[in-house]
Amino acid sequence: MELLNNNYTNKFGENRVSKSDVLDIDKNNRQATICGDLRNLHSVPDNKYDCIILTQVFQFIDNLKAAVEECYRILKPGGTLLVTVPALGRVDCVGGIDGDYWRFTRASLAYLLKQSFPENNLTINSLGNVLASVNFLIGASVEESNFDKNFNDDNFPLIITAIAKK
């Protein structure tokens, strides 16, 4: 299951995916196969999904604990939650100042996820460095930037990633 569209499922799952659901709270999203709220997916049965992909979603959810609990509930045993969240960034243009709630650190994402997932089933990483962050904030493209893009500095994260297994 993925939110808004299934771009990452298609790109990385390729022919290994037999069924792909798209969740959206917006009933007008024609790609959505499930219309619902990630904080309360009462229409989705327990243990349904092998994988849930949430890229840049958590910052828009006011009740993160409820959303993570729902993800855990609807994942099959052994299923995987893949998450990316911002550590740094401008307020979202669509969510706006009243709908963009959070920025994260490795510690805060770990704290959130281990309330539902076993701690030994979590892999959390930070990506970025001070130069990547500055370039991101000023809108410089990768081609315009002259720094080691493979160097990650935990003190200056741009994005936080998590793999959480049920």
Image: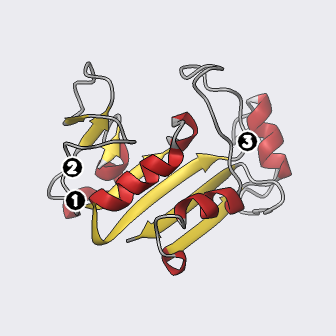
Q: Residue at x 43, y 47 (%)?
A: 67
Residue 151 position, x and y percent, is 76, 63
Q: Name which quarter of the figure residue 154 lies in.
A: bottom right
Callout 1 amino acid: Asp
Which residue has dot 1 on it? Answer: 46
Mark 1 element type: loop
Distance (Cα) linking label 1 and label 2: 17 Å
Rate crowding at label 2 as few (under 14), some (14 to 19) or many (20 or more) other CA atoms within 10 Å: some
Which residue has dot 3 on it? Answer: 88
Q: Residue at x 33, y 42 (%)?
A: 40
> If the image is split into quadrants, where does the C terminus sit?
bottom left
**Vertical placement of residue 40 versus 117, above or below:** above
Residue 27 position, x and y percent, is 25, 22
Callout 2 amino acid: Ser
Callout 3 amino acid: Leu
Q: Name which quarter of the figure residue 25 lies in.
A: top left
Residue 69 position, x and y percent, is 41, 56
3 with respect to 108 (left or right):
left
**Vertical placement of residue 55 versus 152, above or below:** above
Residue 12 at least partly seen: no
Rate crowding at label 1 as few (under 14), some (14 to 19) or many (20 or more) other CA atoms within 10 Å: some
Distance (Cα) linking label 3 and label 1: 34 Å
Which residue has dot 2 on it? Answer: 20
Q: Earlier in the sequence, mark 3 or mark 1?
A: 1
